[in-house]
Image (cartoon, helix red, strand yellow):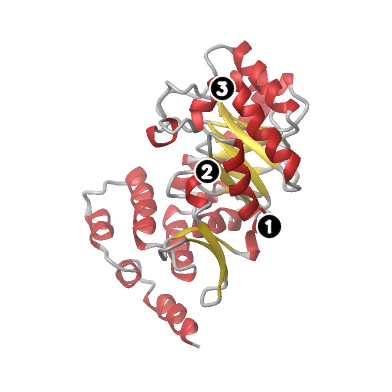
């Protein structure tokens, strides 16, 4: 996989499922990250082809819980992100999915408690030896490209030194979120901190942070010198931010997302979670639409709410053939 001049959908908790990844790709994303999946979770899964839907599922043993769903359409661009604190577990997880994805990424930037409390995510930033162990273990044993995503450390020097150590492991690219662990989403991203990393490395650096409009893509790229740009909330609110023609109506994007959720049989709770995030940015969840989404209990309810009954019925009938 190439990492030069790419538009990339960032990994987002509960958002980066198959329908949303395909939505982003439809509008122009070249690479799409799935949400972080913990190593313990994925290694309890078995792989199966879902003939009814036409996708590949990784299903938790003893349950019918689909932990990761993908399809051939995205095989050359989807990145599987692992939450891990152990090299052997990371390798076991990666080996299970690497035949179905374009790359493996190790999350070293997530500040959320579920990740940090297990020694994963941003907790790895203070453990360079463990980072080295995980990444070199993956690089030695996989033919699939390996990358990782970090945050800025407390000083530019510390960030650059860590980035250099990561580069020496042989990773294909490094994504840098321009915030420190202690920063909140409302705090401005530090693009100059990303620029420091870019100037110090020879591998592609992916810039991430405060890309909300189409113009921000070129702005962060020119400011940091990064090879590629990763978009999170800007894509969640309107995935057409990736389009070279510019953004289209959020309402149109929302309806297209819903149709993809029907087509790929997305979990209704996940669909509602993403819709609520979209709606909450542009409106209020206390207004009629937000309340209706919250009350919806099935895809049929969402189809009726958004005037997609005919498409939903078509998908249902097709699966019965």
Residue 155 rendering spot, x and y as whole percentages: 56, 11
First along the sequence among labels 1 and 3: 1
The circle on residue 99 is: 1
First along the sequence among labels 1 and 2: 2
Tell me which residue sits at (39%, 58%) in the image: 271
Q: What crowding class fits label 1: few (fewer than 14 Cα within 10 Å), some (14-19), or many (20 or more)? A: few
Left or right of 225, for residue 241: left
First along the sequence among labels 3 and 2: 2
Tell me which residue sits at (36%, 47%) in the image: 277
What kind of element bears circle 3? loop
Residue 243 rendering spot, x and y as whole percentages: 60, 50
**Vertically, is 80 above or below 211?**
below
Residue 188 rendering spot, x and y as whole percentages: 46, 23
Residue 151 rendering spot, x and y as whole percentages: 54, 26
Cβ atoms under marks 1 and 2 closer than 8 Å: no
Report the Cα–Cα distance between label 1 and label 2. 20 Å
The circle on residue 127 is: 3
Left or right of 293, for residue 146: right
Tell me which residue sits at (50%, 24%) in the image: 179
Report the Cα–Cα distance between label 1 and label 3. 29 Å
Instruction: From the image, tell me which residue sits under label 2.
Output: 11
Q: Is residue 255 shown to the viewer in this render? A: yes
């Amino acid at each position: 996989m190439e990492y030069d001049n790419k538009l990339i959908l960032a990994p987002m908790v509960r958002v980066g499922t198959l329908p949303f990844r395909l939505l982003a790709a439809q509008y122009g994303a070249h690479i799409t990250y799935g949400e972080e999946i913990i190593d313990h979770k994925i290694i309890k899964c078995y792989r199966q082809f879902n003939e009814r839907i036409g996708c590949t599922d990784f299903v938790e043993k003893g349950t019918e819980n689909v932990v990761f769903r993908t399809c051939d359409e995205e095989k050359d661009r989807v990145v599987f992100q692992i939450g891990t604190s152990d090299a052997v577990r990371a390798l076991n997880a990666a080996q299970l999915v690497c035949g179905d994805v374009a790359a493996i990424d190790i999350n070293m930037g997530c500040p959320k408690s579920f990740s940090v409390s297990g020694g994963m995510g941003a907790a790895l930033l203070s453990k360079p030896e463990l980072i080295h162990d995980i990444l070199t273990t993956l690089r030695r044993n996989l033919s699939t490209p390996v990358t990782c995503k970090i945050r800025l450390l407390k000083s530019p020097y510390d960030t650059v030194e860590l980035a250099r150590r990561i580069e020496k492991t042989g990773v294909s690219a490094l994504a840098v979120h321009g915030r420190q662990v202690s920063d909140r989403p409302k705090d401005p991203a530090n693009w100059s901190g990303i620029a420091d990393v870019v100037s110090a490395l020879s591998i592609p650096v992916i810039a991430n942070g405060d890309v909300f409009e189409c113009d921000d893509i070129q702005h962060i790229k020119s400011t940091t010198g990064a090879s590629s740009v990763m978009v999170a909330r800007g894509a969640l609110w309107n995935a057409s931010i990736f389009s070279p023609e510019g953004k289209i109506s959020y309402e149109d994007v929302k309806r297209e997302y819903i149709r993809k959720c029907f087509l790929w049989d997305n979990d209704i709770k996940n669909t509602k979670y993403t819709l609520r995030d979209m709606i909450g940015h542009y409106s209020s969840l206390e207004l009629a639409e937000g309340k209706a989404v919250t009350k919806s209990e099935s895809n049929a309810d969402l189809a009726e709410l958004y005037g997609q009954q005919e498409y939903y019925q078509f998908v249902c009938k097709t699966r019965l053939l």
